[in-house]
Amino acid sequence: MLKTIIDRLLQGIIVIVCLLTLTFFLIRMIPGDPLTDEKAMSPQVRKENMRIFHLDKSQPVQYMHYWKNLFKGEMGKSIKKEQPVSKIIGQSFPVSVVLGVSGMLIAIVIGIPAGIISALKHNSLIDNGSMFIAMLGISIPSFVIGPLFAKFIATQVPFLKVAGWGDPFDWILPSITLGLGTAAYLARITRAGMLDILSQDFIRTAQAKGVSQTSIIVKHALKGGLVPAIAFLGPAFAMLITGSFVVETIFQIPGMGQHFVNATIERDYFLLQGMVLLFGILIVLVNLAADILLTYLNPRLRS
């Protein structure tokens, strides 16, 4: 187990370094620079700003300077917002985490039970109906579901609001919007995993010995049947947090998604690099947690 954790952490460090390096050079390939759109800036002021942010240096020098500051714990300053990147992330990251965790809970509560029930009722009306709904959930994007919820639910229920992030009631519709697509994928993956386990010889042996259906499901089928779902949850959780900018935009949520998009459009180098660094670390840690859980559920992975 310890060897697995160390290997995954080393791989994660390599991934993060490569990710930051690609981001650093790719964003600088966009025509112009972060100061291109600034209005009424004299050549002297522009030159001084270029010096302050080290944009007057060659890209390799900028790259080395960025890593030097990063090792000191400094992610730089947003060129457009004129605030430390760490402060911007500190204000928006908790919001995105709450939204992502809420969306994942919705996905787990809906997706896993639906997949298990569908597998147990294989080829029945319940199975076909659940999978049809799951396919709809996969096909309909969040930018369609969100406005529908805002128009037909938020406007009709007194304690729900179309936009904002003031109290826990404001989490409900965005979380459902974010989690439904993942729930649909999770239902189909869970169903496939359960069907595979239920067709194994040891399940038939247990049935032949007269073991109750409940014991077979709880003690034998679930542990192996949920392995594919657990493997999916790691990347899915990271995706919910990093890819929630559509939902954040629809419901006017002050999360990280808006900063990520704006930093890319405005060529705000340091803010974008800070976001990518945080997202990279998050994805590595979540996948590590999923790998540890998979190793516990599947002893064959411990070798």
Image (cartoon, rainbow, N blue to C red):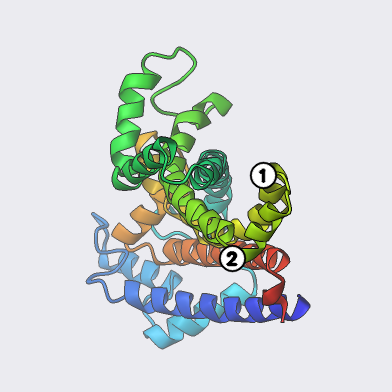
Q: Secondary structure at mark 1?
A: helix
Count of labels shown? 2
Say which residue label 2 marks. Answer: 287
Image coordinates of residue 126 in percent, x first then y, are: 43, 36
Could you tell me which residue is drawn at 50 percent across and 27 percent down? 170
Q: Secondary structure at mark 2?
A: helix
Q: Is residue 45 above or below residue 185?
A: below
Quadrant in the rendering for residue 14? bottom right
Image coordinates of residue 78 in percent, x first then y, are: 45, 59
Image coordinates of residue 295 in percent, x first then y, are: 69, 69
Tell me the tag on residue 177. Answer: none
Q: Is residue 244 above or below residue 172?
A: below
Mark 1 residue crowding within 10 angstroms, few (<14) / some (14–19) / many (20+): few
Taking depth in this image into account, of 227 and 101 the one nearest to the observer is 227
Q: Nearer the viewer, mark 2 or mark 1?
A: 1
Tell me the tag on residue 213. Answer: 1
Q: In the image, 161: left or right of 238?
A: left
Does residue 230 show up?
A: no
Amino acid found under the numbered disc labelled 2? Asn
Image quadrant in which the N terminus is located: bottom right
Mark 2 → mark 1, Cα distance in angstroms: 33 Å
Does residue 23 show up?
A: yes
Q: In the image, 233: left or right of 150?
A: right
Could you tell me which residue is drawn at 68 percent across and 60 percent down? 205
Taking depth in this image into account, of 75 and 120 the one nearest to the observer is 120
Image quadrant in which the C terminus is located: bottom right
Q: In the image, 48: left or right of 96?
A: left
